[in-house]
Image (tube, rainbow, N blue to C red):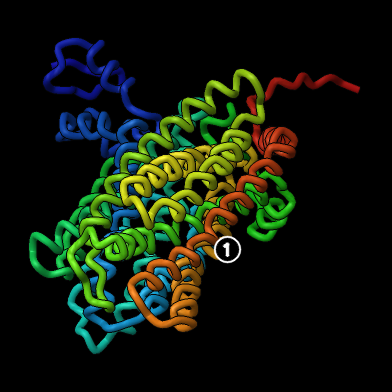
Amino acid sequence: MCVESDGCEIEGCSTLDEVRTLSGSMSPALKSNPDLHPCKPGHKFRAALLKCRSPAAAAGILTFGNVLNYMDRYTVVGVLQDIQRHYGVSDSGIGLLQTVFICSFMVAAPIFGYLGDRFNRKVILSCGIFFWSIVTLSSSFISIEYYWLFVLSRGLVGIGESSYSSISPTIIGDLFNNNSRTMMLSVFYLAIPLGSGLGYILGSSAKVAAGDWHWALRVSPALGIMAGTLILLFVPEPKRGAPDQMGYIKTRTSWLCDMKALAKNRSYVFSSLASSSVSFATGAFGMWIPVYLARAQVVQKTAEPCTTKEICSSTDSFIFGAITCVTGLLGVVIGAVTTRLCRQKTERADPLVCAVSMLGSAIFICLIFVVAKKSIIGAYVCIFIGETLLFLNWAITADILMFVVIPTRRATAVAFQSFTSHLLGDAGSPYLIGLISDGLQQSYATSPLWRFLSLGYALMLCPFIIVLGGMFFLATALFFLDDREKADKQLSQMTRQPSTVKVTAI
């Protein structure tokens, strides 16, 4: 037994150096908590807890939560055709599921952005996860007569998931800085394609295993409860802007002032519009590409015959989900490495890499609709390349925001970027594509060929929107350096450094 400098005795340590080592391993925020002091009973457990609350572990837990966030969102898409048959709704009616989800998501985002800049973030995250997990589980028991209630449940899930997407990146932004932050955000945003792909796989696999599509909605809630508990226990609440300056922020601007500043931030505005283009394409593709490929197989007569009201798309959902997982991994990793290398050549590397990847993605996505009628394999190859290029900009866009927005308004900035990207993007794109497809089908006699062609014509809107997004990223590159410099100057003015000013008599 040994005694620390304040006179307390600690069991299990043979030397004072071990005590100092244990104390030195604690983060400043955790040292200030007397309940976690090594001199308290159960200090060994608390010491182990402290080690688990490292920044890297926190980033890993937040990434796991983000995987579940997107997995829960796209599990429904994995059994979309089963839901359509069960409730007997049209293409536009089934597209309404995603539209209602996104609308509630984007409306709630500014609210959570405001709360995230002012209150305990990890508590908000955990409550959001618990809420959406419970609602998802409950929605699996809604009977056939209450499709409107099922649609409403997707809206409630969107509110819960909005809290996570708006706040969690800001915690990572306050735990890391510079290249380490870029790398951690890249890992965090791997969850978007990875979780989306796993959602397709989970939905189709759970349906096949249980013989009932309802079970697709009963797996992810258990994982969500686990993620919420891990966040409460192991994710710290870092000081806002801690890695960005040496002192501490002595002033906090009002919400109205934050909004005015963001509206004048040209890099933020243009990158948000570019994100809207990405959201439009991914929202429409995530909902309709498995359906489109299944209809292509019916036209080619390479799949089992299906009825005119139902498409056998479980295999296509599984394959598309697997491709989304792989392309997401490749896209985010390639994006992070490419940006890091290009920063050695130009300081505008972030938006320029995004612009080039968007323009390249549009080419291969156009080719999907050219080759799908003749070759499903060829369509999958085009999807693979197109998605890889499209996913390349996820983490880079978040890093652009961290560079040009000061720490005290980042949650608000993330929330309103999410609001804008969903409002102009995937809030309406799934429903719009379904509506265009329904309109084209009504113009001609319904047949498997025309059902395939009408959906393809509707989806051709996506490549044009992606090109528009590439233009917005080019506009971001024009103003990126100026806005980053303005953010640095404003942060310096808001930060109180240790006094080094000499006072002289006048």
Q: Residue furthest bottom?
A: 145
- Name the side, left or right, on which 300 lies relative to 331: left
Nearest the eye: 325 or 308: 308
Q: Residue at x 55, y 58 (%)?
A: 421
Q: Residue furthest right?
A: 506
Q: Is 113 drawn above or below residue 177 in the view shown?
A: below
Residue behind mark 1: 424
Q: Quadrant of residue 171?
A: top left
Q: Is 162 drawn above or below residue 468 in the view shown?
A: below
Q: Position of residue 6 (x, y in %)?
A: 30, 22
Nearest the eye: 230 or 142: 142
Q: Residue at x 54, y 51 (%)?
A: 414
Q: Is residue 138 visible?
A: no
Q: Residue at x 54, y 47 (%)?
A: 362
* Dot 1 crowding, Cα within 10 Å, few <14, some 14–19, many 20+: some
- Name the side, left or right, on which 220 lies relative to 420: left
Q: Position of residue 349 (x, y in %)?
A: 61, 29
Q: Residue at x 18, y 22 (%)?
A: 9
Nearest the eye: 77 or 504: 77
Q: Position of residue 187 (x, y in %)?
A: 38, 36
- Secondary structure, mark 1, is helix
Q: Quadrant of the C terminus?
A: top right
Q: Amino acid at mark 1?
A: Leu
Q: Is residue 19 visible?
A: yes
Q: Quadrant of the N terminus?
A: top left
